[in-house]
Image (cartoon, rainbow, N blue to C red):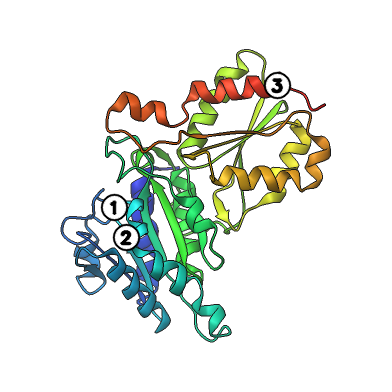
Amino acid sequence: MRELTYLEAVREAMSQEMRENNDIFILGEDIGVYGGAFGVTRGMIEEFGPERIRNTPISESGITGAAVGSALTGMRPILELQFSDFITIAMDQLVNQAAKLRYMYGGKAQVPMVLRTPAGSGTGAAAQHSQSLEAWVAHVPGLKVIQPSTAYDVKGLLKAAIEDDNPVIFYEHKLLYKTKGEVPEESYSIPLGKADVKREGKDVTIVATAIMVHKALEAAENLMEEGIDVEVVDPRTLVPLDLDTIVDSVKKTSRLVVVHEAVKRGGYGGEIASAVAESEAFDYLDAPVKRLGGKEIPIPYNPDLEKATVPQVEDIIQAVKETLNKKIG
């Protein structure tokens, strides 16, 4: 099978959907000739023209408001915000409009829009351009939240998001754009709310999101050299969450480590840990659930400090070993 980069898979998903449905268009800052902040839409204006690849003013609230309004009239907009941090400027449009209008109109109106945005640290973009704020939007009823970790997943999940009749927040980690993977050329979609077991194991379960999936897999390979067999589960979508797959894994391994880049306090890992504790998997746990997240500071500009702020492979290895050395009661 051919290989694409994560970035190319995003572009291909949008292009295939736009060829099939004229109601789909993309709007955002510098997405036309320039191709977007990270080059995701590069070349698309030549195929689809400026009416469907629409450059906007620098106003995240305006971009998001326009997307909500066009979705209400029957269009299926894909808006790109250059950095996920800028969602903060559009929170009223997302939280009080996009997320609630279908419910408030008794299902007579729909808001089929996708907000794509690059997230996470690792590029030296500092405190205002490197955050992981997915737990904010995951808290809001009416919004679906996706964090793909591979090129294959990002194409299938993006196509499912575009075809969904609800607003979807689609996080693309910046460090994943250049990663490669096998991606079918034909159109396919991955159902929202279906996790993926990236690596099977028997000693401990790691539930990891976005870039942390790759770090967890690397940690698992290192731990295998010491005879520790790790299972890695990628939720892929935070909302809806496939709790069944996570529970089944924990019932098999009896130990759970949850890893995300976002600050540990208030992070989505707490939701996963609580959901497992409230499930039948609780009776199978041999050790307390371990959460691993970012430190409670803004992301630094200095590359060494930036790296120290979020979990790395060695931190995951240490967390697994701590879990294996602890017991309940």
| Residue displayed at 30% across by 45% down | 129
Mark 3 Cα shell of 10 Å, populated few (<14), some (14-19), many (≥20): some
Q: Position of residue 109 (x, y in %)?
A: 50, 84
Pointer 2: what residue?
A: 80
Residue ID at (47%, 51%): 134
Which residue is at a point 60% across and 14% down the rendered structure image?
Answer: 225
Which of disc 3 and disc 1 is earlier in sequence? Answer: 1
For the residues labelled 3 and 2, the Cα–Cα distance comes to: 42 Å
- SS category of the residue bearing label 3: helix
Q: Amino acid at mark 1?
A: Val
The reply to whether discs 2 and 1 touch (Cβ–Cβ < 8 Å) is yes
User: Pointer 2: residues within 10 angstroms few (<14), some, or many (20+)?
Assistant: many
Look at mark 1 in the image and give the residue it sits on: 40
Rendering quarter of residue 88: bottom left
- Viewer-proximal residue, 253 or 199? 253
Res 249 → quadrant: top right
Amino acid type for the residue under numbered disc 2: Glu
- The quadrant in which residue 325 appears is top right
Q: Position of residue 139 (x, y in %)?
A: 55, 58
Residue at image location 73% in from the left, 37% down from the top = 250
Q: Is residue 245 visible?
A: no
